[in-house]
Amino acid sequence: MRDTMIKELRSDKLHLQEQVVHLEELLKLKAGEDAQSDDQDNCPLPPMDGHPECIGKLKWMKEMWESDSCYRSYGVNGSQCSFLIYLSEIESWCPVLQGRTASSPVEENSEEVSDQAVIQRSLKGLYSSMENRTQFRWIQGRILSMEKIWFKAGQSLSAKYNLTERKAKQILVHPGAVTDESGFRIAQSAFSGGPLGELVQWSDLISTLYILGHRLHLSASVPELKHLLGLSTDVCPPRQSAVKVDLIYTDIIGLKQIQSALDTSWTQYKCMIRVLDSFGTEPDFNHAAWAEEHYLKSPFGGLNLIPMQFYTMFPHTPDNTFLGFVVQHQLSSQETQRLESVKKRNRALVYGKSAAFWEGKRSYLDTIHKHLEIHGTVDDSAQIPEYVVNHGIVKGTEVQTLLRQSKVFVGLSFPYEGPAPLEALANGCVFLNPRLDPPLNSLNSQFFSEKPTMRELTSQHPYAEAIGEPYVWMVDMYNLTDVERALTGILNQNIEPYVPYEFTSEGMLQRVNVLIEKQDFCYAGRRWPPRSALQVVKAEAGTSCKQACQDAGLICEPAFFPDLNSVMSLADYGLNCHTSQYSESSVVLPAYDQQKHCLLQADHLLFSCVRSDALLNRVCPCRDYIKDQRALCTACV
């Protein structure tokens, strides 16, 4: 009996050992599989910095992950780990778990796109992508008229700088305002006196990208956009896009179309976006929660982008990036020869294609008419003074001819900040720039009421105002003595044509090339401008960093704010804080008060160059800039 019992016990022991081995194998298998544990201790929540929507998305996934089979195809199985992996690596709502890496369209492209970007010798290869597309008809016409100019500029820039070590990027261009879905019809109205500023900028950007040797994919409708992005009808993001884009240029209308089309995969593309935004978007309007809390909501704000992703027509605010356009002033050789014998006449050309711009300006125009013959380019049905020689709506080359024959380009106070005044200066024509008193902003102007900016316009064209005399003369339209003073000064001078370098085709090529190669919002490690360009200025209380840097002959550079946003960094620049704290309650941080209590910015989207506080001294990140190319510092090229 004893022997039998020992034998049975040994058998039980062997069985138990086999069970233990089996269980250990199961545990190893379970530990080796990603996202198989629903235990929060085995898959703790990572720090949520920069991912405010992660918790909400996790709650949604917990309830809705079985609502579409595509989630299972990405490995979602009901566990918190699988939720976190999906939301961090597929849709980018959450931070990536420690020890894992997330792939992105940018990373995939960096490996696959290996061909070199070569400066193009013409723009003919671009036209096929625009043929028979009414949305691009005006744009194509402008590009065609400037083809030789672009070719010469490309050759000139490549002779000055080494442009051979560049990769050709896949770039999606989606001007939302020209799509039929937008309802704006600006592409159709361009030939009948409609606004041209945005179309000018799109034309020049497309030309620039092509001349620089990048691969362009033009989209002018939502279905076309979805096709280029390879979007499927599934709830989940597609596994592979038709075009693996590196950069996306769009406008605010287009951005909302892209967000709607991409849906849950929007965050993967967010860092690639560059938004053409004529008047600019300031940080407090851009931050959705801040804007709502402080009554700054705008139909064009609340996009939660990095403010430098907004590309402006003029260098309004250093919080945004200056893209610009090209001032078109060159004529064909035949037209130039014809005009060489034509001297400037005592003629004024009025800046106003709509009859509404002329209303209430009769005394102003009468005063000008005493000294100059007045010409206009308005619709024939417009009610304008009988002495105005009206040429009707004319093409761009005809406007150049009229400007070359005129001495004065007359502003009527609207439209604001268009390209035409710079075209006048380029043709040797003085711009009469009306003051705006009081200055216009979103609080006192219907036009600016929905614009996501508090910027104040002191004249019809602030950029031209900064150029000053003898090219630009400020005038109070309702003070006829002031008008007479300006006209007397203008008629007693002769000026040569003038174009700031940043508005030439070569200047735009240089600027956009540097932005494409250096400005990166996808990887924090690729910083630009270089840290060596940082110059710190301590502002007086109540002074913005924009103003403080400007007073020092510099420009506020928001990319450097993180470099100053710590007690140790402030000490490096001579500011020893007695006490300090991080705060999300202000857009003027980092700053300090009279007691040397330092306030540091807790929300990176609220860094702002343009705001001030009467009780705080701002610590400002400034940089130098190249003359007539303010978007670039001397160490940036």
Image: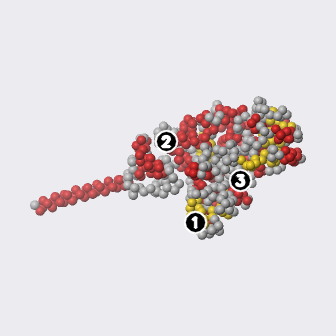
Q: Which residue is mark 1?
A: 580
Question: Residue 238, which numbered label?
Answer: 2
Residue at left offset 69%, top offset 33%? 189
Q: Is residue 275 above or below residue 615?
A: above
Residue 595 in percent (x, y) is at: 63, 68
Give the number of the mark in front: 1 or 2. 1
Going by the numbered disc 2, the residue's amino acid type is Pro
Residue 138 in percent (x, y) is at: 69, 35
Q: CA distance from mark 1 to mark 2?
A: 46 Å
Tell me the crowding category of disc 3: few under 14, some 14 to 19, or many 20 or more residues within 10 angstroms, Cα based.
Answer: some
Quarter of the rendering occupied by the C terminus? bottom right
Question: Residue 630, which numbered label?
Answer: 3
Asked if marks 1 and 2 touch (Cβ < 8 Å), the reply is: no
Residue at left offset 59%, top offset 61%? 600
Tell me the crowding category of disc 2: few under 14, some 14 to 19, or many 20 or more residues within 10 angstroms, Cα based.
Answer: some
Quarter of the rendering occupied by the N terminus? bottom left
